[in-house]
Image (cartoon, grey):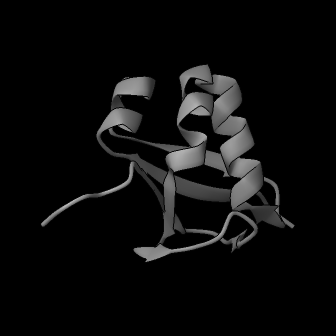
Amino acid sequence: MRPTEIKIKFFATHREAVGHREEALTMNPPATLGELVKTLEQRYPALRQLRRSTIYCVNRRVVQIDVKLKEGDEVALFPPVGGG
């Protein structure tokens, strides 16, 4: 199987932790969101502190950490969102 390119978007505190809004990462399939998160945390250790409160979305849908990723998926990392 050929490597899979995943687009990652960072919002709010996550963007501040990594220093930019988005990047692309190539992974070997079958890759999971959990593997992607571990890779990101190795690159950007500040993300480890945010993990417990992070909301993960794949293609604009909130997902669990064990979801499998495929070519062209867009992953977004958000802090909890409040409103009223």
**Residue 67 horizontal side relative to residue 47, left or right:** right
**Residue 68 horizontal side relative to residue 18, left or right:** right
- Please state which of residues 65 and 9 is positioned toward the viewer in this rendering: 65
Identify the residue at the far front of this view.
84
- In percent of the image, x 52 and y 60: which residue is there? 56
Identify the residue at the far bottom of this view.
61
**Residue 35 horizontal side relative to residue 46, left or right:** right
Residue 51: image x %, image y %?
A: 59, 42
- Asked if 41 appears above or below 53 in the picture, the reply is above
- In percent of the image, x 69 and y 59: which residue is there? 33
- Please state which of residues 34 and 49 is positioned toward the viewer in this rendering: 49
- In percent of the image, x 64 and y 25: which residue is there? 43
Total numbered labels: 0
**Residue 79 horizontal side relative to residue 51, left or right:** left
Q: Quadrant of the C terminus?
A: bottom left
Residue 13: image x %, image y %?
A: 35, 34
Q: Quadrant of residue 25?
A: top right
Residue 34: image x %, image y %?
A: 74, 55
- Asked if 16 appears above or below 67 in the picture, the reply is above
Identify the residue at the far left of this view.
84
Residue 61: image x %, image y %?
A: 45, 77
Q: Quadrant of the N terminus?
A: bottom right
- In percent of the image, x 62 and y 22: which residue is there? 45
- Asked if 62 appears above or below 49 in the picture, the reply is below
